[in-house]
Image (cartoon, rainbow, N blue to C red):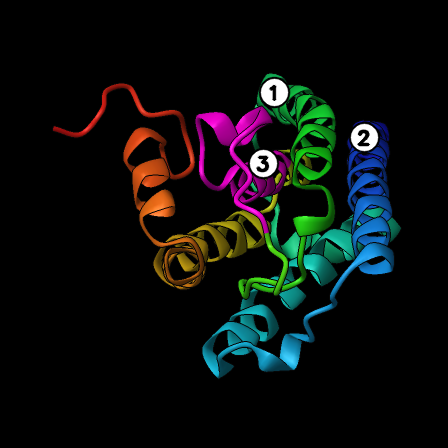
Amino acid sequence: MVRDGVFRFILEAVLLLSIGISGYHRWKARASGEVIERRREAPGLIALRSVVVLPLMLALLAFIIQPRWLAWSHVALPVWVRWVGAASGGAAVPLVWWVVSSLGRNISETVLTKRDHQLVTHGPYRRVRHPLYAVGILLLGSASLLTSSWLVAALTVLAAAGIQAVVIPREESALAEKFGNAYIEYSDRTGRLLPRLGRRG
């Protein structure tokens, strides 16, 4: 369908821009500091990427190459819903830049902290502890609407659940161990994925 061609183009543009921005800043971080190898992470995190993230990326790639390959998982969404996905995907691109540029050399491929890791509390991190994951979930949610695929949507839900239940707790544990009370105080005044509406008592 012509319409699928439009949404395929939008998805491709959003992903290429997001990956390009993120990749550039990650390259700069690797060139200027310590690189933590993924194999140092817990086996559960490696398994999560293999079981959920890899199939999700392959599904998105399949839609970009040939939408008919995902026709078996197609859901008949109203066109305006898919345009919501296009708008939210487009809005996520500058957010990717904001997040990764705020992280600077602290950006890492893992949940582990670097030896010279700094606690970032400016930019989006002023109000939210994990804006990188929040923007990632927004991108995947947008992709679910653009592809109109229940498979992409299901894998997105699994990825978001894994981030909440597995990835974030491990990362926060590592940060609390690294920065102690400073991170606890920071956690008290910020939200996990969205800004906190009120402060804890």
Depth check, front residue: 131 or 120:
120
Label 1 close to label 3 by CB (< 8 Å):
no
Quadrant assignment for the C terminus:
top left
What percent of the width, then of the height, locates residue 10? 81, 30
Dot 3 lies on which element? helix
Q: How many residues crowd mark 2 within 10 Å: few (<14), some (14–19), many (20+)? A: many
Q: CA distance from mark 2 to mark 3?
A: 17 Å
According to the image, label 1 marks what residue? 84
Which type of secondary structure does the marked residue at label 2 adopt?
A: helix
Q: Amino acid at mark 2?
A: Ile
Identify the residue at image location x=41%, y=64%: 170
Judging depth in this view, the residue of 31 and 182 nearest the camera is: 182
The span picked out in magenta is: 118-142
Q: Position of residue 184 (x, y in %)?
A: 30, 45
Looking at the picture, how far across and down is residue 40, in whole percent? 59, 80
Upstream in the sequence, badge 2 or badge 3?
2
How far is mark 1 from mark 2, CA to CA? 12 Å
Using the image, determine if residue 136 lies above or below residue 125: below
Q: Which residue is mark 3?
A: 135
Q: Is residue 144 magenta?
A: no
Question: Which residue is pictured at 56% across the width and 62% down the height?
Answer: 113
